[in-house]
Image (cartoon, helix red, strand yellow):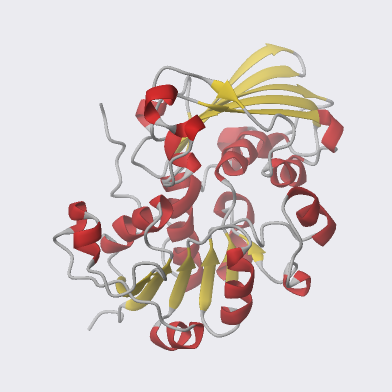
Amino acid sequence: MGERLRKASIVGITGYTGLELLRLLQAHPHVQIAHVTSRQNEGEALGVLYPHLAHLDLKITNPSYEQLAKDSDIVFLALPHKTAQDAVAALHGKVKVIDLSADYRLDDVKTYEKYYCAHNHPELLKEIVYGLPEINREAIKGAQSVANPGCFALLSQLMLFPYAGHLEAVDIMAVTGSSGAGKSPVEGTHHPVRSHNMKSYNINKHRHIPEILRTAQLPEDRLNFVPTSGPFTRGIFATAFVRTKTMPTKCSTEIYKDSSFVRIMKEVSLANVVGSNFCDIAYTMVEENNFIAQGAIDNLVKGAAGCAVQNMNLMCGWDETTGLDILSPVYP
């Protein structure tokens, strides 16, 4: 007999991230779905609400956190920022938790409150493990609860991590697709405007900045970060202009040799990663201690749901690539 299936629940199924999690978990060989939840849509058939899921016999529920912990081996929280604070606190220590909000990504309450809001459970910030597998793999393996990285932050960190501690200054422009803005339509992400437009926002104020600074080992005044809305649906394409104080002894290829989803390329393209859990990175030397890094990910897969499944695999003792290595990029 094989290993028993682990029961997974998704809290917040109706957003893009929740739906992407369901897509990935449906293909996972060791998982079965326990609950897909939404307070607003309790009792509705998921396939009626989302006709592309008409083949699934799933009904939306709204159980208590106690019931979720009882019925699940692992719970994914695809909730808005701040909403997840109490949810993580209610579940932590009772069931394995992966939080895809920003509520536990930072371990310092002052930094969190500077970029987000007041925190109801600051005592938990240092207990929840930061879930970037390529950088924090061993800690994730033993974690009870994990905080998924932000999508901009994940890509930027993977681009800069091989040079952490050697960096003098970094300027990043990262262009994201409309799915990164979430499901609720607003004027700036409405397709008739976005389809022929590019627009930067929250320059040097974006809430993913402290995650990048921490991994890159940079002070705040040594990073310029320009997030930009692009006229496409999925993906993030980032360009970083990097100056170093010294060069590391290990190259990126060596650092990522055991990271199946990081591909060091001659050049990067969104079309080469969309639909997959890959992160493609290319480095171009300009002169000594001065180079350009470019990277691309699918923001809903590697930038969110795919990374969460990677974290689940590590937490459950499975091969890190399980259920994700079948996701070849959608091309064209």
Compared with 79, 57 (above or below) is below
Q: Quadrant of residue 106?
A: bottom right
- Who is closer to the viewer here, 25 or 184? 184
Locate the N terminus and report the quarter of the image it occupies: bottom left
Classify residue 81 as left or right of residue 193: right
Q: Is residue 157 left or right of residue 19?
A: right
| Residue 212: image location, x then y, percent | 70, 41
Q: Residue at x 26, y 70 (%)?
A: 44
Farthest residue toward the left?
55
Whether residue 238 is visible to the viewer of this picture, yes or no, is yes
Image location of residue 56, percent across then percent down? 18, 65
Frontmost residue, 299 versus 242: 299
Q: Nearer the viewer, residue 42 or 91?
A: 42
Q: Quadrant of residue 331?
A: top left
Q: Position of residue 159 (x, y in %)?
A: 61, 34
Quadrant that contains the C terminus:
top left
